[in-house]
């Protein structure tokens, strides 16, 4: 069947789509002939019978791979138009331009078959609903997918073979450049760059922590080189922890060639979309690792030791010792383990002096509750371990202090070397800016003005670098004289003086302990007031000894007697929560300086055998009630009861300031609550007018019983009514 025989009027009534795609941006830029051929398919659509206004070109997927339909908006748009029966024919230069994935290709074929849509390429026009055409289209799709697989396998094979020889040129970390030979890697020719990288490894050998190396760079105000890719210019920026850690963990700096340290994986996210992620692989799964490939900044054994040190600085696994050094005074932090269960001991600090201690939170401790397997103070144990350590290193004490002083001087020399290189770099930039300024035509003021600004900025940077170098040189420690060496050697004979010196920090002591000790096991025997300490030195040697624990207990902390007596009185009438509120209102504190809570009040009662208050099931008439109970008994609002207590109309009492009011509700009080005022009882304002006194005086007379009063509880005229006798003397009459 010919091409025109397959094309029906129903096809011509719909649009024709010309699908244009190139796999990469480089193909779009360089393979322009292929792109032009794809755009030329619009003329073929016209030759097949479609008018120009019914031909649509979809070129949104230029620069995207056809291996998947993910992120190919043009392919999705074309598929949607086919599903809506808007398309009569799809034209592509070849099947691979539409899809190189059989899942996407057969989905498109099914839609075209159901919607009577034709597919055309350079070889002809096909109808997917016809068996022979569908078979041929399926074979073309399979061959397109196989072609992509063969191309990838061929390229990957060449890359892997070249990488196996160490000749594959990929991005190098800062501090290295590619040489002229195959796979030749050289140190960076800039002495400042190589010096900054060497300073990282020198300081790590001293500090043993990537974070401390980073802090040293920041404290010295040093910059670190940064180069994002091979073509990007080298920039000097403030160092970051990530950059320092990347230098320490990259095997290239140890002279090794590595390839295949990560792999790309596909996964489906929460929205059901196919995503890609990069997963780092362990060293055993790297595709290529060639130690000794080139000259590095450190050797391979030093790199292995650095990786082990970095691993121990991270948070250790359960039941494992290790971890980065902290600032606390506990010397055995990260080294101590429980001698009973083998778990790692945790540190704590107690008291105003922040005395260190160790405890083992075994599996029976959940949420901070339970019985600790071990809980002991660390002062005596730390002292005993320190004495054992000093005794072990006593033969080396003669030269230890001298090496420490020389190391301090070497640290300053290393920082000065970096600043000297920074001055040289600033001098070069200033000279280059001057040469560029003098080479420009003076009449071209637009260019000359910009070059002049750059020259001035370079001169200011040079001046700042020189000033910083001069300041650092003034702070440089002086070289050790023969007398200084003699005094240091005499000091080295007594390492305990150096150990106890104020200048020796807890971090320095812990660093020294870790150089020789691998693990310290502690077992506590409370009945015998002793602790068994086992030292495991590096190399496997074991040493154990007993440490006497203090027998005396610390002074008992107790609550003051006044607070205990008040709790005893309040517990007869109130629950623990109410008592805690009363004590807090009076600003009372526990024996440890804490605010009272319901639990703390309950603990205090139980310790001093104070009975708990038990509320009566029903209030007895005439008994003392709380404000809420009285309001419920009198069928009034609690706010009204509080107001009458303030006015003095209702008598109440408090056990202590801040305690709840207690009101005695009896028949006399209930008789004073009426619905209508009796004859002779007037309102407060009228009583004030007749008596010629203030409102407070009237209330005082009511409290003393000199005036009779009732309360109106119903209707709109609620309030106090007072009985006033006309011939009753006024305040001034009484005073006279």
Image (cartoon, rainbow, N blue to C red):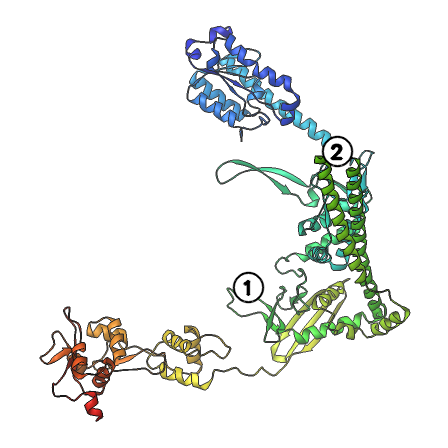
Which residue is rendered at x = 81% and y = 54% of the image? 417
Q: Nearer the viewer, residue 727 or 81?
A: 727
C-alpha separation, residue under disc 1 versus residue under disc 2:
84 Å
Q: Is residue 202 visible from the viewing direction of this image?
A: no
Q: Earlier in the sequence, mark 1 or mark 2?
A: 1
Q: Judge whether residue 445 can be spotted in this image.
A: yes
Q: Is residue 121 above or below residue 550?
A: above
Q: Nearer the viewer, residue 255 or 490?
A: 490
| Count of all numbered marks drawn on residues in the image | 2
The residue that disc 2 covers is: 443
- Residue 75 is left or right of residue 196, and the answer is left
The answer to whether residue 459 is left or right of residue 730 is: right
Q: Residue furthest front?
A: 443
Q: Give the residue displayed 57% in from the left and 66% down from the top.
A: 361
Q: Most extreme residue toward the right, as rendered?
A: 482
Where 105 falls versus 264 (above or below)? Answer: above
Label 2 SS = loop
**Residue 100 drawn at (x, y percent):** 58, 24
Q: Which mark is residue 271?
A: none
Question: Between residues 263 and 597, which one lies in front from this camera angle?
Answer: 597
In the rendered view, does 436 fall on the left or right side of 111?
Answer: right
Name the residue that disc number 1 marks: 363
Q: Position of residue 120 (x, y in %)?
A: 53, 14
For residue 475, above or below residue 703: above
């Amino acid at each position: 069947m010919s091409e025109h025989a397959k094309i029906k009027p129903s096809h011509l009534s719909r649009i024709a789509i010309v699908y244009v795609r190139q796999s990469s941006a480089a193909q779009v830029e360089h393979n322009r002939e292929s792109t032009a051929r794809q755009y030329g398919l619009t003329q073929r659509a016209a030759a097949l019978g479609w008018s120009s206004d019914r031909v649509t070109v979809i070129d949104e997927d230029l620069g995207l791979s056809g291996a998947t339909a993910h992120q190919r908006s043009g392919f999705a748009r074309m598929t949607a138009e086919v599903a809506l029966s808007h398309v009569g024919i799809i034209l592509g230069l070849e099947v691979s331009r539409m899809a190189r994935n059989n899942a996407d290709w057969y989905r498109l074929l099914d839609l075209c078959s159901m919607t009577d849509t034709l597919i055309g390429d350079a070889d002809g026009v096909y109808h997917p609903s016809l068996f022979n055409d569908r078979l041929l289209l399926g074979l073309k799709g399979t061959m397109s997918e196989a072609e992509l697989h063969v191309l990838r396998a061929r390229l990957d094979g060449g890359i892997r073979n070249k990488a196996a020889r160490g000749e594959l040129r990929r991005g190098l970390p800062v501090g290295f450049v590619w040489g002229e030979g195959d796979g030749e890697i050289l140190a960076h020719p800039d002495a400042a760059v190589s010096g900054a990288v060497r300073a990282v490894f020198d300081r790590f050998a001293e500090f043993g922590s990537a974070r401390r190396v980073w802090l040293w760079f920041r404290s010295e105000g040093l910059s670190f080189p940064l180069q994002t890719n091979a073509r990007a210019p080298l920039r000097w920026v403030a160092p970051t922890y990530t950059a320092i850690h990347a230098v320490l963990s990259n095997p290239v700096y140890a002279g090794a060639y590595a390839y295949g340290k990560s792999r790309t994986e596909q996964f489906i996210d929460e929205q059901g979309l196919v995503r890609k992620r990069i997963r780092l692989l362990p060293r055993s799964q790297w595709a290529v690792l060639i130690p000794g490939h080139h000259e590095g900044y450190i050797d391979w054994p030093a790199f292995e030791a650095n990786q082990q040190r970095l691993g121990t600085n991270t948070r250790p696994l359960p039941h494992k010792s290790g971890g980065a050094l902290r600032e606390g005074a506990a010397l055995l932090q990260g080294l101590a383990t429980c001698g009973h269960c083998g778990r790692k001991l945790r540190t704590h600090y107690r008291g105003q002096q922040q005395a260190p201690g160790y405890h083992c939170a075994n599996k029976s401790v959940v949420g901070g509750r339970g019985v600790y397997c071990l809980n002991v103070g660390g002062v005596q144990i730390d002292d005993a371990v320190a004495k054992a350590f000093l005794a072990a290193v006593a033969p080396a004490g003669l030269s230890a202090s001298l090496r420490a002083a020389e190391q301090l001087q070497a640290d300053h020399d290393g920082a000065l070397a970096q600043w000297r290189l920074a001055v040289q770099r600033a001098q070069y930039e200033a000279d280059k800016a001057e040469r560029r300024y003098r080479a420009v035509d003076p009449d071209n003021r637009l260019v000359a003005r910009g070059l002049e600004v750059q020259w001035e900025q370079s001169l200011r940077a040079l001046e700042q670098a020189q000033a910083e170098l001069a300041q650092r040189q003034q702070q440089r420690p002086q070289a050790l004289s023969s007398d200084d060496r003699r005094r240091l050697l005499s000091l080295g004979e007594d390492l305990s003086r150096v150990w106890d010196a104020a200048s020796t920090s807890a971090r320095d002591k812990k660093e020294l302990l870790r150089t020789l000790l691998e693990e310290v096991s502690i077992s506590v025997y409370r009945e015998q007031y002793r602790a068994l300490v086992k030292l495991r030195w590096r190399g496997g040697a074991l040493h154990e000894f007993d440490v006497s624990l203090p027998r005396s207990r610390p002074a008992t902390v107790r609550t003051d007697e006044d607070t205990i007596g008040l709790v005893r009185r309040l517990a007869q009438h109130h629950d623990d929560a109410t008592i805690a509120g009363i004590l807090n209102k009076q600003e009372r504190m526990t024996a440890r300086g804490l605010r009272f809570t319901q639990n703390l009040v309950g603990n205090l009662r139980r310790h001093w055998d104070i009975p708990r208050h038990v509320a009566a099931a029903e209030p007895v008439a005439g008994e003392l009630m709380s404000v809420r109970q009285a309001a419920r008994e009198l069928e009034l609002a609690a706010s009204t009861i509080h107001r009458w207590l303030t006015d003095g109309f209702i008598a109440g009492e408090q056990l202590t300031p801040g305690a709840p009011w207690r009101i005695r509700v009896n028949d006399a009080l209930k008789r004073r609550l009426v619905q209508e005022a009796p004859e002779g009882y007037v309102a407060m304002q009228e009583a004030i007018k007749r008596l010629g006194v203030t409102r407070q005086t009237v209330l005082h007379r009511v409290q003393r019983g000199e005036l009779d009063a009732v309360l109106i509880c119903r209707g709109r005229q609620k309030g106090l009514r007072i009985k006033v006798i006309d011939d009753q003397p006024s305040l001034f009459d009484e005073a006279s």
